[in-house]
Amino acid sequence: MSIPFPSDAWIKAMMEDLNQSQAYAEAAKNWEGDFYFIIEPGGSLDHTVILYMDLWHGKCREAFEITDPEARKPAFRLSGPIQTWKKVMTRQLDPMQAMMTGQLRLQGNMAMVMKNVRAAKELVESCTRIPTIFPV
Amino acid sequence: MWYFASPLIVYGEDALSHLATLEGQRAALITDVHLVALGLADKVTDFLRQGGLEVVCYDRVEPEPSLELVKEGAEFLLTHSPDWIVALGGGSVIDAAKAMWILYARPDLDPEAINPIEHFNLRAKARFVAIPTTSGTGSEVTWAIVLTNRAERRKLGLGSREAIADIAIVDPAVVMDLPPRLTADTGLDALTHAIEGFTSTYHNDFTDGLCLKAAKLVFEYLPRAYRFGKDDPEARARMHYAATLAGLGFGNAMAALAHGIGHALGAIFHLPHGRAVALALPYTIAYCAQGEPGSTRYAELAYHLRLPAESEWVAAKALIEAVTDLMRQVEQPLTLAQAGIAQRDLEREMSVLIDHAMNDTQTIMSPRVPDESELQALLWQMYSGDISL
């Protein structure tokens, strides 16, 4: 059954997928840092949605939709319009190219990112495995 | 949306004299002690002074430049406030100078955090000239920066799209006396750039032709440059151009798995960069060719190089044979054992090698990305010389 994106159910499905992925466990074994995935409005999505993930040494410890942006102080924030997220999640746009061209914006400890690029790749792979319904 | 980046390339006889046309106040020449001793730094300084620039020189760059070294070089720049940075040297010098340029603009930045996402506004302080003194790195035309974290014994594949030279001066005169071993190591680096640039997942229409031309030039001219040196100035010049063409190719399409493995090997066993990546290349071609059918571009590459190309498998096999034949002609090691790495040392360092190669920025550009066990198998194949296909 497909899950609407962005939603609490969707990020929990991704958490489950990540925690079952041997490839992610290997690639992200040195990763420390939680995320806000900030999905900006577009199409039928009329408000910003923030999805939270706590990623720690190859596992996702927590994942849920955030209603109060001040609820957490995540180490990383990745933001962009819903259309860009959809392109990345459906493999129409490479995530690194999306960030390098300013279509997605990443804030956080860039040294950690540059030393763990494989973890980022596996994170995106996980996104593409979730059966997803996007806003029209 | 994507970008194709290139400096102004000044090439050919007397290209170095273009330095006399630079307008500004002060140039910081970044180089190493060997190029100072050879008189090349003086030659560059003379041209810069002819143009009316004051010149200060930092000559402490070492092979495999460290995070500490680039911080020291950035301090030098902050002390002297140049409006031009002129990097004279091989890949180590040019990469170090690019990192210093970034820290000159952003002294607060941890060099490990140099990344292609943030904007550093480099040209508000200085512009950049790169003069390669080897024929292989391509760093004169790329925005890639490889630095070494000595504490972690790890090479970091960093970069910033802004950190591409304004001017690359590709003058064959500066490489005429390159020693044969350095000619072979760096020339095979250029070949690896060309092949991986053509086959990486970021390959594109703007880079394919550059990679193909570079590969053809290396196959044709590297053996001559290696054997005859300055007595074959045509081979020297064509290899110098091949390196720049390959740099433009892979710099805009990225490298791949051989570079990821080569960086890890280089940092742990101190193999020269070109030797390490070239050693990995035939094994990574074999590995990728055994992936999902149709996922590589070896047939297209082999076809353009006039090698057998009836199928992906035939093409990969022909490509491996062509690469290893070239390596034999220039007397390069074909295995880690031949490169002087002992079995017990490889065993001891295996988990570190795998960890670093897995997370190298180039590895993930490969058409087939290995997991830990596949990477371990690949490294043992590289040790024993088993190129299974």
Image (cartoon, coloured by chain):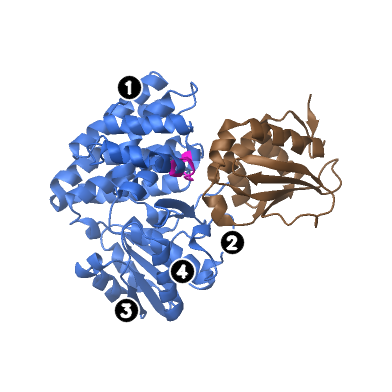
Chain colours: A brown, B blue
Q: Chain of mark 4?
A: B
Residue B200 counted in the magenta span: no
Could you tell me residue B14's position as x and y percent?
Answer: 26, 63
Specify whether residue B362 is painted magenta. yes
How far across and down, in percent of the image, does residue B354 sit? 43, 39
- Labels 2 and 3: the sequence-earlier one: 3
Q: Gap in Å between the C-alphas at discs 4 and 1?
A: 46 Å
Marks 4 and 1 in Cβ contact (< 8 Å): no
Residues in magenta, as a range? B356-363
Q: Determine which of the numbered discs, if any, sits on residue B257 in the image.
A: none
Q: CA distance from mark 2 to mark 3?
A: 32 Å
Task: Give the number of the disc on residue B127.
Answer: 4
**Badges 4 and 2: C-beta atoms under 8 Å apart?**
no
Q: Are marks 2 and 3 on the same chain?
A: yes
Q: Quadrant of residue B19?
A: bottom left
Whole-Å distance between the Cαs marked 4 and 3? Answer: 17 Å
Q: Which residue is mark 2?
A: B119
Q: Which mark is residue B308?
A: 1
Give, as a three-letter code, the residue at label 1.
Pro
Residue bearing mark 3:
B49
Q: Secondary structure at mark 3?
A: helix
Q: Secondary structure at mark 2?
A: loop
Relative placement, left or right, of A118 versus B237 is right
Which mark sits nearer the N-terminus, 4 or 3? 3
Say whether disc 4 or disc 1 marks the residue closer to the N-terminus: 4
Label 3 sits on what residue type?
Arg
